[in-house]
Image (spheres, grey):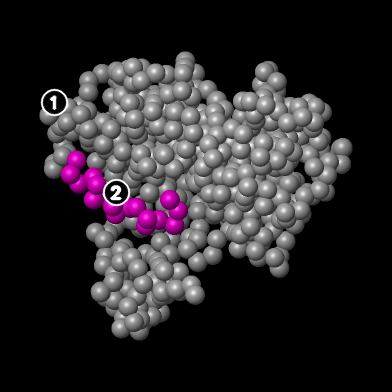
Amino acid sequence: MKRTALTLIVDPIACDGHGVCAELLPERIRLDRWGFPIIEAGGIPVKLVDHARRAAESCPRLALSLVERPL
Amino acid sequence: MAAPEGIPRLLAGLNGDGRALSLDEHVNQWGPPPASMSASFIDELDRSGLRGHGGAWFPVGAKWRSVRRSITKRPIIVANGAEGEPASGKDRLLVHQLPHLVLDGAVMAAGALGASRVIVHVPGSAIPTVESSIEERRRFGVDSVDIEVVEAPDRFLAGQESAAVNTINNRNSARPSFTGLTTVRDSGVGGRPTLVQNVESLAHVALIARFGADWFRREGTPESPGTALLTVTGRWAEPQIIEIPLGIPLGHALGLRQEDARGIQGVLLGGYGGGWLTAAAALDMPLTEDAARQYGSSIGAGVVALLPSGICPLSEVSRVVTYLEGQGAGQCGPCVNGLAGLDLVMEKLAFRPSSLHGGVSTIPGLCDLVEGRGACRHPDGVARFIRSALRVFADHVELHLSRGACRGNTAPMLPVPTRPQSSQSSPLRPVVR
């Protein structure tokens, strides 16, 4: 069986560095010196999945997606 | 027709006067293409081991298969000869002088993938030749597919896969899309599954279809079979395009021995998104993409530039970084900001190192901030170019920091287009903070 994990990916064209995502998911997302998100690589741990979903849904540019990716 | 032997392969068809081979001459040279193509040709491509010569070296068979997977819509074939890389000339050579080899490969892709539309994406200068070649084929009823031509803008990123599709779709010309969720293989030209294949790759396809995978594998190594075109600058009086079997040492390909390394400050492999190597390492390196990556570089689209002694390498690097910064699509924040920062520090390092507080220590951190953070690989390429330059020219960096910039102007060596490209500038440039 192929193992997958929920992963956050950002569309860097759509992203304008609003910063909501880092506010809602500081465990996985920090902002660079210009205010653009740096997302920690790897799958989202189960206990953070709800926070990750909220971060993705709250992006004003819809630039953040929570997707299933092969491990 | 008997399978041709030895090298050159692709370039064996050149007629020597710079003119495009006519359809007659082309068929005399290579024989007629197979009458029909089926999906089983993709297995033959797998066996051949052909990888893409546009820069990414992705296995061609696997790429075709991934386009064929989405079978509910007819796919589109794009023969990509945009060649935005200023130091590369091999794709232009192919479309100007061997257009039928490229067109054969594209039409074969259409046959194998069930496409009925082929789009040739080339710079404006190549359009008359390509159009008259298409007209020749039409007259003789060679192809059962429609072939169109779309002009590739004169931009570094014009040949990037999604940028080419955007140009063809008449949308956001020569600017890449974010392809993290869907790629052009799923939804490209007109929303259809799209194969974007470099013209040199297609020329190899045209020969594999005639003479087979085993023939293709007679040159090169088992892991990197076949031949490749290289555009070589700094070896002879003028840049030259050569065809080499993959896997031979670069020195052998260029007719240079290890002792010749002394007169060469560094070797740029793979173009402006590639990486610098010391001459000693480069001349010994087997020309395969895997070896190049182990050396922190890439064969990319086959660019080789030798930097002779007597030229300040840091001013060469700075000029190129300024060009690359200006060629960004201006769409992604980390790239827009990071490349501007990198351009500034590299310019200081080259021309006014005393203003570079903290030396070069900030540069790797800036590279970290752009790598993997654009919609396309442009920032990654710039970072690789800079990181490898700091490594290979470390002694020269020390000289600048301790004694100041090199005096006197030497003629620029690496080609950087100087024509203003204001008509192409982005209306969508985001706010830079």
Tally the numbered discs: 2
Q: Is residue B236 above or below residue B163?
A: above
Q: Quadrant of the N terminus of chain B?
A: top right
Which residue is rendered at x = 18% and y = 44% of the image?
B361
Residue B293 place in picture, x, y as percent: 40, 43
Which residue type does callout 2 highlight?
Cys
Mark 1 residue element? helix
Q: CA distance from mark 1 to mark 2?
A: 26 Å
Which picture quadrant has residue A8?
bottom left
Q: Which residues are magenta?
A: B360-377
Which residue matches tag 2?
Answer: B367
Tell whether B48 sits left or right of B287: right
Residue B45 place in picture, x, y as percent: 65, 47
Whether residue B417 is visible to the viewer of this picture, yes or no, is no
**Which label number is shown at residue B403?**
1
Residue B393 vs residue B288, the one in the foreground: B288
Residue B367 counted in the magenta span = yes
Tell whether B76 sits left or right of B237: right
Which residue is rendered at x = 61% and y = 41% of the image?
B201
Marks 1 and 2 on same chain: yes
Which residue is rendered at x = 59% and y = 54% of the image?
B62
Q: Are marks 1 and 2 in contact (CB under 8 Å)?
A: no
Q: Is residue B120 above or below residue B368?
A: above
